[in-house]
Amino acid sequence: MTQDEALFLKDYDPSAYERPSVAVDLVLMSVIDGAPAALLVRRDEHPHAGRWALPGGFVRIDEALDDAARRILGQKAHMGDAYVEQLYSFGAVDRDPRMRVISVAYFALLPADRFAAALKADRGLTLTRIAVDWPGETGGPVAAMGEDGPLPLAFDHGDILGLAMLRLRGKIDYSPVGFALLPDRFTLRALQDVHEAILGVPLNKPAFRRRMLDKGWLEATGERETGSSFRPAELFRFKPRTA
Amino acid sequence: MTQDEALFLKDYDPSAYERPSVAVDLVLMSVIDGAPAALLVRRDEHPHAGRWALPGGFVRIDEALDDAARRILGQKAHMGDAYVEQLYSFGAVDRDPRMRVISVAYFALLPADRFAAALKADRGLTLTRIAVDWPGETGGPVAAMGEDGPLPLAFDHGDILGLAMLRLRGKIDYSPVGFALLPDRFTLRALQDVHEAILGVPLNKPAFRRRMLDKGWLEATGERETGSSFRPAELFRFKPRTA
DNA sequence: TGACATATATTCGAATCGAACATAAGTAAA
DNA sequence: TTTACTTATGTTCGATTCGAATATATGTCA
């Protein structure tokens, strides 16, 4: 029991012990041209210079984790408000060769058009297609596809991307997260395209329509899309509250 | 852009900044007498002396998060191996009045009989029934019921318990976590009791049996339960691999 | 041997989903 | 003005799943 007591006292005064750094990394996802995509930052410095990393930063001592995620969304990704959700915490000892860093990963979902300004403002950013080579919810790593094949990723950010895709696949058909990937008004076809991109499989159109309308998440606007050379679809809006 | 550069440099040398402490807290869950239960530790010291807390401890500088969870499972909860899964990271600034502590919560699942030795070895431990007053997957806080009503909980541990229950409810019928709450061999009725306790609703017996057998998770042993004064049920075993 | 309690199996109707098909509503070209 | 064309929207039908009810099986115990 003396060992237990010693441990207890040690734990009671953690200031005597070296503390890890805590970072937040952001998986900023969207759907571009029918495929999932994520925002990456080119690393200029050691370690992993030249590789691509998730936007991230260290959590400040007086800043909540969620606040750090939103700050990095603005500072590193040059993005305004977005749907943000905590994903998982990565804590392998050697995941950063410089020092012990525990990373709390978040993922954020945004409509495709929200990336244009950020990409123009910061040339170190890129928006890459995410290639998922596992079916359903098998899980595993994914590839960030550049112009000439998969981009080399820094740290364990490939694992983080893979987990983000897995979480998204798992949530999209029983939670309203898909709407965060679309503009304010959208057609049912656009919503289905988003679901198909995330799930990686084609979906049955009438069944998808029925399911979505039955969930009560959608509100018909009465407006129709413009610019199509065929019958225009009705525009819907996400109904925030089930009331 | 100078502000961005300054931020970049600051982030690059986090040793110059104060680091939070990182702790792991464990939600050790089981099903006792048809109700979910969790292991709590009575706090003797300030802060929250007299309140009940989850077993936890600080993550060491050379220890992975998952390893810390398993160490605390042994040292603080006096438990051997168990199903352990990361739950969520709690990072509000004032969640611990002493100092900034970020807690990575894990939950562990164990059969009811595995708690007896721990409760005898450490009188500061208690195994309390968890009262969930929200239906389905609404989510929210839960109560840890003592002999005379709900126990006062320390820190944000009520929120952690609530999230653990929510996660468990969400996973139990499409993932094989339920088996971690049962001994090696068990009857289908026992499995259904566990599911009903977690979900908080009665289930249809033939449908439950069909679903479980169709999933291919179960292996019939050919043995039967003993000690019943009626027809004994067949004992099943969890089939680890789908092959 | 038979009452009893529960395990196990079967059947049936409701709800859900995928697939095929039918109809509607726009544009664009004849 | 009409017709071809393309996609939106709606309907129907069969397969599957699930809950509920019912039937049968199998052990203990009086």
Image (cartoon, coloured by chain):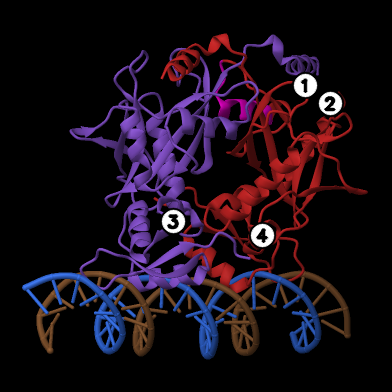
Chain colours: A red, B purple, C brown, D blue
Chain letter, disc 4 residue: A
Residue under label 1: A98
Regarding mark 2 in the picture, which secondary structure is present there? Answer: loop
User: x, y percentage for residue B61?
Assistant: 63, 20
The disc at residue A47 is 2
User: x, y percentage for residue B26?
Assistant: 46, 34
Magenta highlight: main SS: helix
C-alpha gap between disc 4 and disc 1: 37 Å
Quadrant where the N terminus of chain A sits is: top left
> Tag 2: residue type?
Pro
Residue under label 3: B184
Chain letter, disc 2 residue: A
Residue contact between numbered discs 4 and 2, judged by CB atoms under 8 Å: no
C-alpha gap between disc 1 and disc 3: 44 Å
Q: Residues within 10 Å of mark 3 (few under 14, many from 20)?
A: few
C-alpha gap between disc 4 and disc 3: 36 Å
The disc at residue A199 is 4
Q: In this view, does B85 lie above or below B226?
A: above
Relative side of B27 to A61, left or right? left
Q: Is residue B108 magenta?
A: no
Residue bounds of the magenta highlight: A62-73
Q: Which of marks 4 and 3 is in front?
A: 3
* Viewer-proximal residue among A127 and B74: B74
Q: In which quarter of the image is residue A51?
A: top right
